[in-house]
Image (spheres, helix red, strand yellow):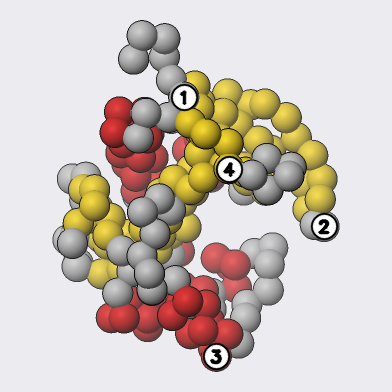
Amino acid sequence: MSILETERLLFRHRQESDLEAFCEMESDPEYRWPQPVHPRGELERSFREGLVPPKSFGLLATVFKPEGRYIGRCGLYPLRNDANEVVPGEAVIAFYLARPYWGRGLATEAGRAFIEYGFGQLGLSRIEAGMNVKNLASIRVIEKLGFAWVRSGEGGGSSWHEYELRRAAGV
């Protein structure tokens, strides 16, 4: 069942038939950078844990409609504060796309859809995005979508940027 759709993308809950494409994507060292590739058994376990039960608010399987192929996961998930409590009215946007689909404008297309969905359907007031400072493609996408830089920091062995987008007044 489709949750959201764009011209080239379909967003739905993950299905068992997505397993091979998921493992292929997660086994690509360039996609995983700067994190290591995990063993196949761990990838399968992680995939299956995400199958049941489907979350009402979280990352969705992303299908490239021209091929009918699972190419990753995109969406919004709840923003949590330092006490690990969900911040009402706020979310984090994320795009995880397989490397063969990079550079096609798909993250931007997905981002526009989820921003509209988040502010329009979910009534969010703020959406946050975070990425490794070396991930220049993600930075370009987030800036193209209108996000503003909030802060930078270091942690977990890498440096990161945090961006935000606030719902326009009166919307």
Kind of residue sitting beneath label 1? Ser
Q: Mark 2 against mark 1, which lies toward the viewer?
A: 1
Distance between mark 2 and mark 1 Cα atoms:
31 Å
Q: Residues within 10 Å of mark 2 (few under 14, many from 20)?
A: few
Badge number at residue 157: 2
Q: With respect to residue 12, does 85 lie above or below?
A: above
Q: With respect to residue 169, does 129 lie above or below?
A: below
Considering every residue shown, the one lying at the far bottom of the view is: 41
Q: Residues within 10 Å of mark 4 (few under 14, many from 20)?
A: some
Q: Quadrant of the C terminus?
A: top left
Q: With respect to residue 83, does 21 lie above or below?
A: below
Kind of residue sitting beneath label 2? Gly
Distance between mark 4 and mark 3 Cα atoms:
31 Å
Disc 4 designates what residue?
Answer: 86
Q: Nearer the viewer, residue 158 or 113?
A: 113
Q: In the image, residue 83 lies at what x, y percent?
A: 73, 44
Q: Which image quadrant is residue 169 in?
A: top left
Disc 3 designates what residue?
Answer: 41
Which comes sooner in the sequence, label 2 or label 1?
A: 1
Disc 1 designates what residue?
Answer: 125
